[in-house]
């Protein structure tokens, strides 16, 4: 199952009908369009690449051309039910700020990132080579990824930041972290929210 | 199918009310239409021109329009599909009532007895035109620079009439820096002895010097440091070395002088005073109390486009607009076009601009 398919499956399972959804780094709008068609969400995209903005406008999706690393100050608080951040966390300069902005404008964040502690990556490192895998398809010299994240690291940071983080399973359930997740998951799939909020 | 028309409306009994409190009659509006009005009248796009533009937005090889690359048959704004209307603003000098028109009270041109008009007044006059044409709603209103201001004002003044707005290289109000440049331009005209307090119509001597200088100043603000560097560098126009005198030497000087001299043949100095004043007074924050209030009733979808190198109406001013519209839960998209050409980029062939506005409408 490709990441896109896996991601879309999880989004469909987790995002309720008619939700207000912000997609950070929305690309050409595939996810928003799918959610709009299947879940009638009210979608909004942000992307830094003009061709992606053009693609979204062509598809009738409202979009903002901007850099999520600069913050989401254009967006008012609690504007959205869900903020999506797919395969982008490892590329932002200020992940804590991005997460906190997500949880300012939306009640929940849904996040995916390549898990650097996946056993395949560990094998690469044991042999002394930077991992190049389907989840991390770049060489060290051309990767846009500026951060190395593991599922355990992510959980630890969320705890420090008073952020509730739950793994999204393929079966549609949220379940607590198992010790095997960090070893066996190629990607981290999380739902985050402010601690103290009803889940 | 392109057709030129002249609409005349408003009478002494029922004049056009102006934001200043004054009123105006009669009001002639020169406009052109492109394409065919659909049976349900739902395919109308109003295009608003910038400071010194006119109604000829789209043309032919013999008489090119000022937005030919964007508007025309099979163009991004496809006149095979849309009925495009473009009118000359009031206060201008390309067919609509302005300071060079005859003042009915005196029988001679208004000069500076013409009332000061605002962007809102221009839009009110356009609305009267569309009402007379029995257009029930606008599919879109599109404009760049001062045209974008009109588009925004349309959304604020007629919130349910406009279905979508495209505002390019635009702002909800000018920065003090932009005000300053316009002020210097007006001073150039006002201090030209041939301006003669605005009463130079029919005389042999016209305030051409002042108007040309005003245009030169304006032109500097429409370009960017980068575009000037790429286009002219420090090249000399006709000499191989400095002449150590005060003649026009640098290519950039010669270019500006050419632009200024060309401009005086097609533009009226008083109109330049009036239109820059209208742009300077444009302030949606002040007029409505806040930007939120200006747009809260609007039903329109918005596409706001800025130009990366536009320092006259910089991208952050467009972002402020977008931010307000987002807070109001309006349907709004924003794009910042990468271009080295400065404010003028909105008038230059730009595939990105065409694609964005074309797919939006």
Image (cartoon, coloured by chain):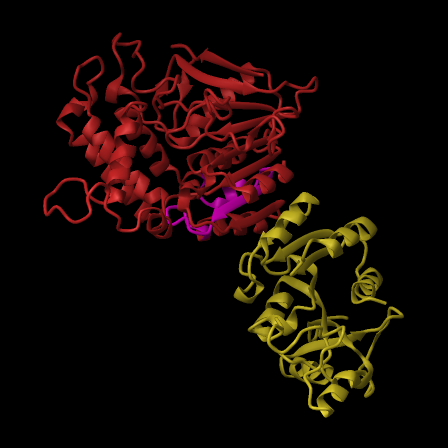
Above or below — where is B32 with respect to A13?
above
Which quadrant would residue A84 be assigned to in this image?
A: bottom right
Image point (24%, 35%), residue name: B257
Q: Report the residue that reaches farthest toward the left.
A: B245
Give the left or right position of residue A158, taking residue B12 as reference: right
Span shown in magenta = B288-315
Q: Chain A is drawn in which colour?
A: yellow
Residue in the foreground of this view, choosing between A116 and B351: B351
**Chain B visual colour:** red
Q: Does the magenta stretch include residue B309?
A: yes
Q: Which residue is drawn at 48% across and 45% down?
A: B291
Q: Which residue is farthest bottom? A: A126
Residue B101 colored in magenta in the image: no
The front one of B282 and B194 is B194
Residue B117, x across and y down, in percent: 35, 27
Measuring 24% from the left and 30% from the top, which residue is drawn there? B211
In this rendering, the answer to whether A93 lies above or below A28 is below
Q: In this view, does A100 lie above or below B237?
A: below
Task: Note whether residue B299 is visible.
Answer: no
Tag count in the figure? 0
**Quadrant in which the C terminus of chain B appears:** top right
Q: Nearer the viewer, residue B116 or B92?
A: B92
Q: Which residue is drawn at 48% across and 29% down?
A: B48
Give the position of the N terminus of chain B as an image quadrant.
top right
Residue A154 appears anywhere in the view: yes
Residue reaching furthest top? B107
Q: Is residue B42 left or right of residue B310?
A: right
Give x and y (percent) for residue B156: 52, 36
Q: Is residue B58 left or right of residue B44?
A: left
Image position, residue B299 (x, y; %): 62, 37
Residue A140 location (% of width, % of height): 62, 78
Outermost residue toward the right? A171
């Amino acid at each position: 199952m490709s990441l896109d398919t896996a991601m879309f499956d999880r989004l469909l399972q987790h995002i309720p009908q008619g939700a207000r959804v912000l997609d950070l780094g929305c690309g050409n709008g595939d996810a928003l369009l799918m959610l709009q068609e299947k879940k009638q969400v009210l979608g909004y995209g942000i992307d830094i690449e003009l061709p992606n903005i053009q693609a979204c406008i062509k598809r009738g999706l409202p979009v903002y051309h901007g850099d999520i690393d600069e913050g989401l100050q254009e967006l008012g608080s609690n504007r959205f039910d869900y903020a999506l951040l797919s395969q982008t966390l490892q590329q932002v300069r200020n992940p804590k700020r991005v997460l906190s902005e997500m949880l300012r404008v939306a009640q929940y964040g849904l996040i995916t990132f390549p898990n650097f502690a996946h056993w395949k990556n560990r094998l690469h490192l044991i042999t002394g080579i930077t991992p190049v895998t389907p989840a991390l398809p770049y060489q060290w010299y051309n990767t846009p990824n500026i951060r190395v994240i593991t599922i355990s690291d992510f959980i630890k940071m969320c705890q420090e930041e008073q952020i509730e983080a739950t793994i999204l399973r393929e079966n549609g359930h949220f379940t607590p972290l198992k010790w095997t997740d960090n070893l066996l998951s190629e990607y981290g799939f999380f739902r985050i929210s402010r601690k103290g909020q009803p889940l | 199918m392109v057709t030129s028309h002249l609409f005349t409306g408003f009478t002494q009994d029922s004049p056009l009310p102006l934001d200043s409190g004054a009123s105006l009659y009669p009001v002639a509006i020169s406009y052109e239409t492109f394409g065919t009005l659909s049976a349900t009248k739902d395919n109308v796009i109003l295009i608003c021109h910038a400071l010194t533009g006119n109604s000829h937005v789209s043309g032919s090889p013999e008489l090119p329009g000022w937005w030919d690359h964007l508007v025309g048959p099979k163009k991004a704004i496809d006149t095979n599909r849309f009925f495009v209307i473009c009118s000359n603003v009031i206060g201008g000098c390309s067919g609509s009532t302005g300071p060079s028109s005859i003042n009915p009270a005196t029988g001679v041109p208004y000069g500076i007895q013409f009332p000061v008009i605002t962007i809102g007044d221009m839009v009110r006059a356009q609305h009267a035109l569309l009402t007379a044409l029995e257009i029930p709603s606008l599919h879109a209103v599109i404009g760049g620079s001062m045209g974008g201001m009109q588009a925004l004002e349309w959304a604020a003044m007629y919130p349910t009439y406009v279905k979508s707005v495209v505002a390019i290289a635009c702002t909800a109000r000018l920065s003090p820096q932009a005000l300053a440049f316009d002020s210097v331009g007006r001073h150039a005209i006002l201090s030209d002895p041939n301006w003669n307090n605005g009463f130079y119509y029919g005389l042999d001597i016209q305030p051409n010097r002042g108007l040309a200088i005003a245009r030169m100043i304006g032109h500097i603000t429409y370009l960017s440091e980068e575009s000037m560097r790429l286009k002219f560098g420090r090249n000399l126009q006709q000499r191989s070395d400095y002449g150590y005198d005060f003649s026009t030497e640098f290519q950039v000087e010669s270019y500006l002088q050419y632009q200024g001299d060309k401009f005086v043949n097609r533009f009226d100095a008083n109109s330049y005073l009036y239109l820059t004043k209208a742009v300077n007074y444009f302030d949606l924050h002040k007029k409505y109390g806040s930007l939120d209030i200006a747009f809260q009733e609007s039903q329109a979808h918005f596409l706001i486009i800025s130009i990366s190198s536009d320092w006259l109406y910089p991208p952050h001013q467009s972002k402020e607009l977008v931010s307000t519209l987002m807070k109001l839960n309006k349907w709004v998209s924003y794009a910042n076009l990468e271009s080295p050409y400065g404010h003028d980029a909105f008038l230059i062939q730009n595939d990105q601009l065409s694609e964005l506005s074309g797919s939006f409408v």
